[in-house]
Image (tube, rainbow, N blue to C red):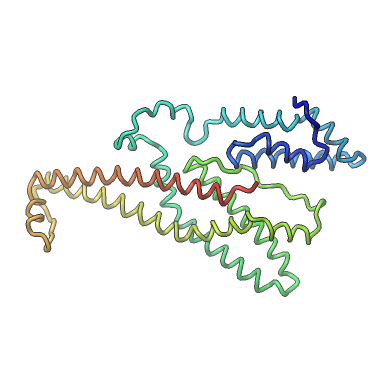
Amino acid sequence: MSTGRQPETVREYLDALQIALKGCPPALIRDALTDAEEHLRNELIQHPAQNEREVLMNVIDTYGSPEEVAETYQTMEAAWSGPFPKAAEPREDKRGFFSIVSDPRAYSALVYMLLALPTGIFYFVWTVTGLALSVGLFVLIIGIPFALLFIASERVIAHVEGRIVETLLGVRMPRRLPPEYPQYRTLLSRIGDALIDVRTWSSMFYLLLMLPLGIIYFVIAVVGVTLSLGVTAMSLFALLTNESHIQIDAAPVMEHILHTAPGLIVLAVIGVLLFFVVLHLAKLIGYLHGKLAEVLLVRL
């Protein structure tokens, strides 16, 4: 239990909780703040006869001080294994070039790269269409409600994307949507908050960015995998059947070499090595994209 002055408002409690969780993953902080705010707001609603300070004093006795809540969340996070168990990480002593074949992060990142194109197309079309309609309908009476619904939909889509990122890329993302309390805020204040919230625009930017990134990821994954498997399969087929159909008009000497057994063996090895390169590249892309998603989608 903290010996310092206890918070007397919801805002003070949340600020103290965020300070107590300093250094933790931003998504963990976001979830802790969301849970705490929801609990505190519900307590205020259930005790309308008491002022905010009195409710906070009672809640702290049962829910815990900000420091106690922060310690609880840190303990739960340490125990949670996630999509890639933390217990397996210390055993990864061999980090050689070929060890990537047993790393699930590489394969899950490869799957994410393949999914990035269809999801990127959907995100881009939805965001562009929503922005265009919001601007076009703004002069009408339905313009403001439509814009609010569009912003809410963007937050939901960004949250779903965050769940995909955490599942496939192993980056901690928020598991709860920030709660809305219309009874505490007027319509104009909600509009103002949505417009000045940097995460509203960073989420939109991320969803728009997913189209060009999705194209790049998809091309790298498809070309890399098909090229490596194709070269390997073609070389092995030629070795087994003694029929090589490789033609290189610009380099007849190279073409001759690739019609021999040693040349085909070398080509098969190159194909296998290329697959390992693709896995390493996929893991790197997954790591970098996870950091990008954490920066643009986590709202504190």
In the displayed orientation, state which residue is furthest to the front. 4
Q: Residue furthest right?
A: 49
- Image quarter for residue 37? top right
Q: Is residue 161 above or below residue 5?
A: below
Residue 56 appears at what percent x and percent y?
83, 35
Q: Residue at x 78, y 39 (%)?
A: 40
Task: Name the one closer to the observer, 22 or 227.
Answer: 22
Q: Quadrant of residue 106?
A: top left
Query: How many discs appear?
Result: 0
203 left or right of 209 in image: right
Asked whether, in this view, residue 11 is left or right of residue 171, the answer is right
Q: In the displayed structure, would residue 136 be above or below residue 1? A: below
Above or below for 80 versus 168: above
Q: Position of residue 197 (x, y in %)?
A: 67, 56
Name the quarter where the N terminus is drawn. Answer: top right
User: Residue sitting at 60 percent across and 36 percent down?
Assistant: 23
Look at 55% across and 40% down and name the residue there.
172
Which residue is at the front of the view, 142 or 273? 273
In this image, 28 relative to 110: left or right?
right
Position of residue 51 measured from the top left corner of the image (x, y, whole percent): 89, 40
The answer to whether residue 159 is above or below residue 102 is below
User: Measuring 59% from the left and 49% from the top, which residue is drawn there?
Assistant: 159
Percent position (x, y) of residue 249?
Answer: 11, 63
